[in-house]
Image (cartoon, rainbow, N blue to C red):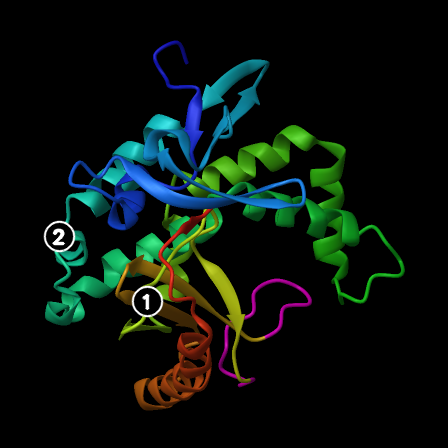
Amino acid sequence: MNNEPSDHHYVPQFYLRNFAVGPEQKKLTTVAKHGHLAVWAERSIENLGYERDLYVHFRRGVPVSVEGDINRAIETPISQSDTWAKVVSGRTDARDRSDKPILYALIRHLHARTPHAFSTMRELSELSASPDSDIPFTDEEREMEAQLRSNPGLANAMFNMMVSSLDWTVDAYRGAELSIWRSPIPLRSSTTPVFAMGAPAHPALRLPLPGMTPYQLIVALNRTTLATLVLAILTTPSVTSKLMLTSHAKSIGALLVSLPISRPFDTQ
């Protein structure tokens, strides 16, 4: 681990640069919470969206970092792809079917790699131990979560396995519907760049965790472009597409109406 960086960015810098200000693309206009105040400032991209040793777990007492694996296996291929070049240059209208794998990988990866995602994993584990929980855990799920509670290092290792690989996303790809939306309203993002938004209920929706409600994943790719992703259990293409388009149209219309006019990059 000696040569690995200790400041682990959970929001990739190549993504943040799409919201940068100035020709050098090294800073962002941000708004952050400080107590009961909201503070606006220009901040360096390098100093945003990171935690120290976030992607470190222990194997037989030895610290193991997957930060380098994330860069090599995921960030570099995405950031150097033709698809990302279209996003950076604002040519998302030139997107075609060949771009779906890259954008799918980006959304699933950004959604899974944040401290918020890790916190949610641990919270779910704690809820499974409560007899008063409203979430309908199966006996098998409760047993698995009990193992995670008894071995905190195992939870860290599982989190790192998810953020350093996309293997766990492969099965859902064929039933995924990706849509690109151009906005006349300047968009902004956050240090939790992908957020889950409610979607109309449908039996084809993929809801892999106990207690989940229908949702879609939304991310701003740059100041003018949103991407939305809905995961479904594959039935037939026509049924899946109709489901996704209905879901997107209802939710995104409301979202665009409520988007702010300003262009800050939100930080927590």
Q: How far from the left and from the top, in percent, is residue 161?
A: 47, 38
Q: Relative to 156, is 101 above or below?
A: below
Report the amino acid beneath label 1.
Ala
Please report whichever mark, 1 or 2, sits nearer to the chain's N-terminal start.
2
**Magenta segment range?**
201-213
The residue depicted at 78 percent of the width and 53 percent of the height is 127
Q: How far apart are marks 1 and 2 (CA)?
A: 15 Å
The local crowd at label 1, few if under 14, some if 14 to 19, many if 20 or more residues have their Cα within 10 Å, is: some
> Where is residue 171, by image quadrant?
bottom left
Query: Which secondary structure, mark 2?
Result: helix
Considering the image in quadrants, where does the N terminus appear?
top left
Q: Relative to 7, is 122 above or below?
A: below
Residue ID for mark 1: 227
Q: In this view, does 52 lie to the left or right of 140?
A: left
Considering the image in quadrants, where does the C terminus appear?
top right
Residue ID for mark 2: 85
> Where is residue 80, by image quadrant?
top left
> Where is residue 9, by image quadrant?
top left
Q: Is residue 208 left or right of residue 251?
A: right
Q: Which one is nearer the viewer's eye here, 239 or 254?
A: 254
Report the amino acid beneath label 2.
Ala
Q: Which one is nearer the viewer's eye here, 242 or 268?
A: 268
The answer to whether residue 267 of the structure is visible from this angle is: no
